[in-house]
Image (spheres, helix red, strand yellow):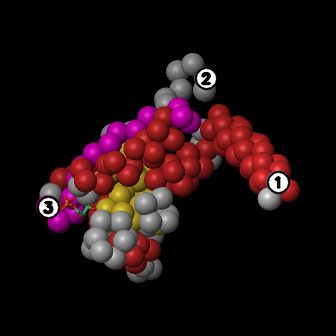
């Protein structure tokens, strides 16, 4: 990043503080890439006025992507997306006996016009990586970081490949 350039900034909005333990990996991944993240608890049904105000003010607040995590009848991501043209990434949370299938369908089945880029149930890391990929269109330094991240993953898998071959040979 060049001197004077703003650090990319995203908001991670969750419907409840009960979602947070499963979202720590999202915050850590974003920070690992040098992305500033504000974590917020805003509920589409318990604090609808705050949800509206947040989404309407998100661009002026300097956010470039919104990540929205919610469980049960998870309309948070869709509601935020309705009030802004900023990309919204939905993270369905496994908060009920349905293990997140309820939240997944609520988020992924948005009608035409208001998209929510939904990741897997509890997909904290992929949500962060998708946000970094979106940001990398503007913030060129993030592109190299993503390439480096994939190189590290590749090295890890190649090492595991060797280890499993050795373990299989020893049986
Ligand atoms: C959703 O309901 C939240 O996102 C959370 O996943 C779920 C349960 O919330 P709490 O009852 O734990 O506050 O709105």
> Label 2: few (<14), some or many (≥20) within 10 Å?
few
Quadrant containing the N terminus is top right
Quadrant containing the C terminus is bottom right
Judge from the rendering whether residue 127 lies leftward or rightward of residue 75; answer left or right.
Answer: right
Residue 96: percent from left, percent from top: 28, 70
Residue at 30% of width from left, 74% of height from top? 97
Task: Work out how far the residue at label 2 is from the one at label 3, CA to CA, in angstroms.
Answer: 42 Å
Asked if the beta carbon under badge 2 is closer than 8 A to the nearest atom of ligand 1, the reply is no
**Circle 2 SS class:** loop
Q: Are marks 2 and 3 in contact (CB under 8 Å)?
A: no
Judge from the rendering whether residue 97 lies leftward or rightward of residue 159; answer left or right.
Answer: left
Residue at which label 2 appears: 2
Asked if the beta carbon under badge 3 is closer than 8 A to the nearest atom of ligand 1, the reply is yes
Indicate which disc, 2 or 1, sits on the residue closer to the N terminus: 2
Ligand 1 picture quarter: bottom left
Q: Which mark is residue 170?
A: 1
Q: Which residues are magenta?
A: 32-46
> In the rendered structure, does residue 153 fall within the stretch colored magenta?
no
Corner quadrant of residue 9: top left
Task: Work out how far the residue at label 1 is from the one at label 3, CA to CA, in angstroms.
Answer: 57 Å
Residue at which label 3 appears: 46
Residue 98: percent from left, percent from top: 34, 76
Task: Work out how far the residue at label 2 is from the one at label 1, CA to CA, in angstroms.
Answer: 52 Å
């Amino acid at each position: 990043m060049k001197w004077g350039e703003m650090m990319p900034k995203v908001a991670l909005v969750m419907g409840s503080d009960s979602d947070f333990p499963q979202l720590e990996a999202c915050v850590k991944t974003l920070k690992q890439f040098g992305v500033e993240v504000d974590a917020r608890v805003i509920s589409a049904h318990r604090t609808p006025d705050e949800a509206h105000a947040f989404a309407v003010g998100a661009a002026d607040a300097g956010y470039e992507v919104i990540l929205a995590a919610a469980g049960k009848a998870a309309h948070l991501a869709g509601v935020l997306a309705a009030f802004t043209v900023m990309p919204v990434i939905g993270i369905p949370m496994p908060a009920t006996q349905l293990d997140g299938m309820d939240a997944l369908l609520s988020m992924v089945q948005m009608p035409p016009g208001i998209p929510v880029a939904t990741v897997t149930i509890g997909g904290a890391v992929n949500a962060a990586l998708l946000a970094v990929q979106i940001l990398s269109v503007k913030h060129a330094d993030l592109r190299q970081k993503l390439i480096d991240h994939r190189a590290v993953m590749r090295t890890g898998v190649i090492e595991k490949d060797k280890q499993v071959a050795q373990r299989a040979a020893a049986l």
